Image (cartoon, rainbow, N blue to C red):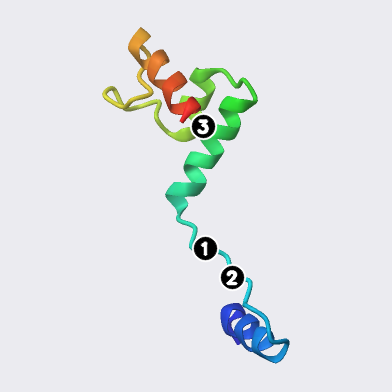
C-alpha cells in the first residue's frame, strides 16, 4: 500500500489531519544542495564542478567576474 494512502487511512482512524510531505522535485534538491555548498564556504569553482556547470560557458555560474557576482546573488536568495 502506498505511504500516502496508508497515512491518510491512519489519520482518519486517529481523527487527525494526515501529515503529508509537499512534492519535491529534483530541481529543488539541486538548488538545496548548491545552497548548502555555499553556506559551507565551498570554493565556487568546486561548486561549479559538483553542480555540473563546468562545461557551460553562458551559465549564470560562469568563471568571469560577473559570474562570481551571480553566485553571490544566487546564494543570498
What is the number of the mark on residue 30?
Answer: none
Residue at which label 3 appears: 50
Residue contact between numbered discs 1 and 2, judged by CB atoms under 8 Å: yes
Q: Quadrant of residue 65?
A: top left
Q: Residues within 10 Å of mark 3 (few under 14, many from 20)?
A: few
Q: Residues within 10 Å of mark 1 (few under 14, many from 20)?
A: few
Whole-percent x, y for residue 18 in the image: 62, 77
Spatial separation of the CA atoms under disc 2 and disc 3: 31 Å
Q: Nearer the viewer, mark 1 or mark 3?
A: 1
Q: Quadrant of the N terminus?
A: bottom right
Q: Position of residue 72 (x, y in %)?
A: 46, 19
Q: Is residue 61 above or below residue 35?
A: above
24 or 59: nearer the viewer: 24
x and y, in percent, of residue 71 in the image: 44, 21
**What is the distance, in whole Å, between disc 1 and disc 3 at their CAs?**
26 Å
Most distant residue in the right direction: 14
Q: Secondary structure at mark 3?
A: helix
Tag 2, which secondary structure?
A: loop
Q: Which residue is mark 2?
A: 20
| Residue 25 sits above or below residue 18 on the image | above
For this rendering, which residue is in front, 17 or 51? 17
Residue at 61%, 78% in the rendered image:
3
**Residue at mark 1:** 22
Report the mark closest to the observer, 2 or 3.
2
Assess disc 2: are there few (<14), some (14-19) or many (≥20) residues with their C-alpha within 10 Å of its C-alpha. Answer: few
- N-terminal of the pair, mark 2 or mark 3, is 2
Residue occupying the point 63% across, 78% down: 17
> If you read the primary sequence from the N terminus, does the residue marked by circle 1 or circle 3 appear first?
1
Residue 54, picture quadrant: top left
Question: In the drawing, does residue 33 fall left or right of residue 55?
Answer: right
Could you tell me how far apart the alpha carbons at marks 1 and 2 are, in whole angstroms?
A: 7 Å
Amino acid at each position: 500500500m502506498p505511504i500516502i494512502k496508508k497515512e491518510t487511512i491512519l489519520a482518519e482512524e486517529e481523527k487527525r489531519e494526515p501529515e503529508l510531505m509537499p512534492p519535491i522535485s529534483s530541481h529543488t534538491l539541486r538548488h538545496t544542495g548548491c545552497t548548502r555548498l555555499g553556506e559551507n564556504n565551498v570554493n565556487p569553482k568546486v561548486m561549479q564542478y559538483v553542480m555540473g556547470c563546468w562545461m557551460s560557458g553562458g551559465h549564470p555560474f560562469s568563471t568571469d567576474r560577473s559570474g562570481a557576482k551571480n553566485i553571490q546573488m544566487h546564494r543570498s536568495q
